[in-house]
RNA sequence: GCCGGAUUAGCUCAGUUGGCAGAGCGGCUGAUUUGUAAUCAGCAGGUCGGGGGUUCGAUUCCCUCAUCCGGCACCA
């Protein structure tokens, strides 16, 4: 007797062992058709797997996340089968499930073309139509290696070679295609259905290592039904509309041009936004006890040698030569800050010193990494270095985390992922120092009430690190803020303070940024709001638009009143219909349009229209200006 | 940096056996004086990314460089 408990608590008993297929059929024909796999006591298995003893079992369908993942995994296998049929010389490697889809990496002397993609997808649909049974086989390791080697599948043989000794070697067979796979899989290729699509081609290094050969990666997406697929494709289209590069052009904020790859030409409105954001963060830093400095852009190589950058960071540094010296454009501000710190003698009583700088940094990022505002070669961070004693690490870190969360909240970001990265394999400093630094950082994050995701071994070579990732509205994560505990640089650059004991000690440096680079932050901000920035941040807040030229003089008065109130306002007295003007300014995401015609001119009022709104509000001019002025103060109003 | 794709007017894009360069939007000018997401007409606007080659002739074919896009690697 085998008793099976279903998720609803009901129990079904069978005379003997029963397969997932049998169980699903026993429950009902509808479920039998939808069944993709089973979950036995929490572990997901093939539908064909036999349940030998009493267990908690649920039937997995494409409606649950595990089922969808299975579907995608099978899509990868079906794609590999299609590729092997069409191009027998290709070697298959790995094909995992990823967010929204799957990919498979193939080894092939010549890359695939977009035309090939169409053929592959068409063949996949044939394979689905064939409804080939998918069966699991357990092989002897040596035999499996020999098998794949004989087939010319050297990557597969290598994968098996590297599997742990005790791991079972399972192969899945569908039609003529046989692949190494842990499973589980769908019972047959027909279960994949039709809701999939091959999306793009890309190169990808074998085992993710750029020293290895490059494979051909084919990305695809797969869903439970065509409605979901359609919704996904629609979502992608919508995402494109909020791409910050597109918004930047449409809103007239900035452009990037091939004469200066990785650098931004900020237009008047974009620069206004930049300055507004900078003013905000500068004020917050001042209020938090930071002092602001500015350090040289070009610095002799000797300083970079002393700091370790010449050794560790050389390839990212731009250099210039002058009078037989090599100068480097600074990629970071930290060595400069240590030079300021070192002027004169510092007492423990002076610590902590929180030294901030909006310094222009240049890094020669690899050309393939450049991406709009998100990854540039010239940028400004809201950078600061906190020089403190070891005892102060916790309190300074907590204060920083609090400040950071408050800033993110002001700017409209509520969901922050905090990653804690600990000691990497290659590092400087003793284990005792690392123990101390990691503990201090952990204590501080706990004190700040932050939950962290552990990111093992990803710390900086000089110390552990917190990374603050923001998710934009499209669901992408961007690392913006960071805090790094550094015991190494103060020593290398000989920064000291005199302690209570009258002796010299090296301070600890906390490298920290909240916005990260202003460039990247603005990119994230634009995507987060789809260009519809909060009023206080909007580079153009109000347009005064006339209905007829008869209202021009009054419109000028309105505009002047707004400017007097400190608002960023423009006047639109073009000889155009109001609908035309409204549309134009709406497309550039101006948050407020004040419409004035003969009535408003007569009454001394304005018709206020919010971006995207359908109704208007008639207000006295003074009232409107006062209200908007208040709104424009933004979060700094409470400072 | 690596793999693939792209580069035509300010923007979005058409342009096939290689034969004088196109549209829409935007801009300018004129008419229209307009009530909340596109009024009408006219005009201007191009080394077809740069360089080299093949050809009587190249936006089109070949080579090369640059930049951009999508991945990969990188991201102190």
Image (cartoon, coloured by chain):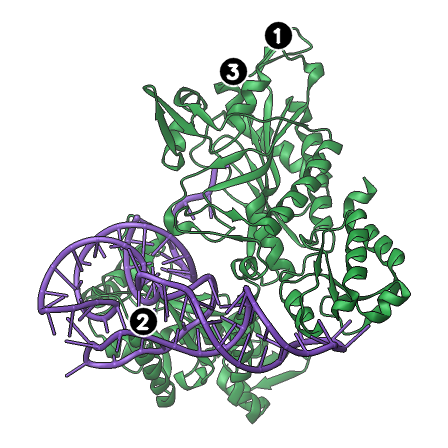
* Residue at image mark 2: A179
In-front residue for pair A330/A27: A330
Return the mark for residue A494. 3
* Residue at image mark 1: A503
Instruction: Pinpoint the chain carrying mark 1.
Output: A
Front: mark 1 or 2? 1
Residue at 70%, 42% (x, y): give it.
A280
Q: Does A515 sit above or below residue A93?
A: above
Q: Earlier in the sequence, mark 1 or mark 2?
A: 2
Cβ atoms at labels 3 and 2 below 8 Å apart: no
In-front residue for pair A445/A53: A445
Instruction: Tell me where residue A565 appears, x and y as whole percent.
Output: 81, 48
Instruction: Pinpoint the chain carrying mark 2.
Output: A
Residue at 41%, 28% (x, y): give it.
A328
Residue A155: quarter of image: bottom left
Q: Does A391 sit above or below residue B43?
A: above
Chain B: what color?
purple
Instruction: Pinpoint the chain carrying mark 3.
Output: A
Residue at 48%, 41% (x, y): give it.
A378
- B74 horizontally vs A240: left or right: left
Q: CA distance from mark 1 to mark 3?
A: 14 Å
Residue A145: quarter of image: bottom left
- B17 horizontally vs A117: left or right: left
In-front residue for pair A341/A222: A341
């Amino acid at each position: 007797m085998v008793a099976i408990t279903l998720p609803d608590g009901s129990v079904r008993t069978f005379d003997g062992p029963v397969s997932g297929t049998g169980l699903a059929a026993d429950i009902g024909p509808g479920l039998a058709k939808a069944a993709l796999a089973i979950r036995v006591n929490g572990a997901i298995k093939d539908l064909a797997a036999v349940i030998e003893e009493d267990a908690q079992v649920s039937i997995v369908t494409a409606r649950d996340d595990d089922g969808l993942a299975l579907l995608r995994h099978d899509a990868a296998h079906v794609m590999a089968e299609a590729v092997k049929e069409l191009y027998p010389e290709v070697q298959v490697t790995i094909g995992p499930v990823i967010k929204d889809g799957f990919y498979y990496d193939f080894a092939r002397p010549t890359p695939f073309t977009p035309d090939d993609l169409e053929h592959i997808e068409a063949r996949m649909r044939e394979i689905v139509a064939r409804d080939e049974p998918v069966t699991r086989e357990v092989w002897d390791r040596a035999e499996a290696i020999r098998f794949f080697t004989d087939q010319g599948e050297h990557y597969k043989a290598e994968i098996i070679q590297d599997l742990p000794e005790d791991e079972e070697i399972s192969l899945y067979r569908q039609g003529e295609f046989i692949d190494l796979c842990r499973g589980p899989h769908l019972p047959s290729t027909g279960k994949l259905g039709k809701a999939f699509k091959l999306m793009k081609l890309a190169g990808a290094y074998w085992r993710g290592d750029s020293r290895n050969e490059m494979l051909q990666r084919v990305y695809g997406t797969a869903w439970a039904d065509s409605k979901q697929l359609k919704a996904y494709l629609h979502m992608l289209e919508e995402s494109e509309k909020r791409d910050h590069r597109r918004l930047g052009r449409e809103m007239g904020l900035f452009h990037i041009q091939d004469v200066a790859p990785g650098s931004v030409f900020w237009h008047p409105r974009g620069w206004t936004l930049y300055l507004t954001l900078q003013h905000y963060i500068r004020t917050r830093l001042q209020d938090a006890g930071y002092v602001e400095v500015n350090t040289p852009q070009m610095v002799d190589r000797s300083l970079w040698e002393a700091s370790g950058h010449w050794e560790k960071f050389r390839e990212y540094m731009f250099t210039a030569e002058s009078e037989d010296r090599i100068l480097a454009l600074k990629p970071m501000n930290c060595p400069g800050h240590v030079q300021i710190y070192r002027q004169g003698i510092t007492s423990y009583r002076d610590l902590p010193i929180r030294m901030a700088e909006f310094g222009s940094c240049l890094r020669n990022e690899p050309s393939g990494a450049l991406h709009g505002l998100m990854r540039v070669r010239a940028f400004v961070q809201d950078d600061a270095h906190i020089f403190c004693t070891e005892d102060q690490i916790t309190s300074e870190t907590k204060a920083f985390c609090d400040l950071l969360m408050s800033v993110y909240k002001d700017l409209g970001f509520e969901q922050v992922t905090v990653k804690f990265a600990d000691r990497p394999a290659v590092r400087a400093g003793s284990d005792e120092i690392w123990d101390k630094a990691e503990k201090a950082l952990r204590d501080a994050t706990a004190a700040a009430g932050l939950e962290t995701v552990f990111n093992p071994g990803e710390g900086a070579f000089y110390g552990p690190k917190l990374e603050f990732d923001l998710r934009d509205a499209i669901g992408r994560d961007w690392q913006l803020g960071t805090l790094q505990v550094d015991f190494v640089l103060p020593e290398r650059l000989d920064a000291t303070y005199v302690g209570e004991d009258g002796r010299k000690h090296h301070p600890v440096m906390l490298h920290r940024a909240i916005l990260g680079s202003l460039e990247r932050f603005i990119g994230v901000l634009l995507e987060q709001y789809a260009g519809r920035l909060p009023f206080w941040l909007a580079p153009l807040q109000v347009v005064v638009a006339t209905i007829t030229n008869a209202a021009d003089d009054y419109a000028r008065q309105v505009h002047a009143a707004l400017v007097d109130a400190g608002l960023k306002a423009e006047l639109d007295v073009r000889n155009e219909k109001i609908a035309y003007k409204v549309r134009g300014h709406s497309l550039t995401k101006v948050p407020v349009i004040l419409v004035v015609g003969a009535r408003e001119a007569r009454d001394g009022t304005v018709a206020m229209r919010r971006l995207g709104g359908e109704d208007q509000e008639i207000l006295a001019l003074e009232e409107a200006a006062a209200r908007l002025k208040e709104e424009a103060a933004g979060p700094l109003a409470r400072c």
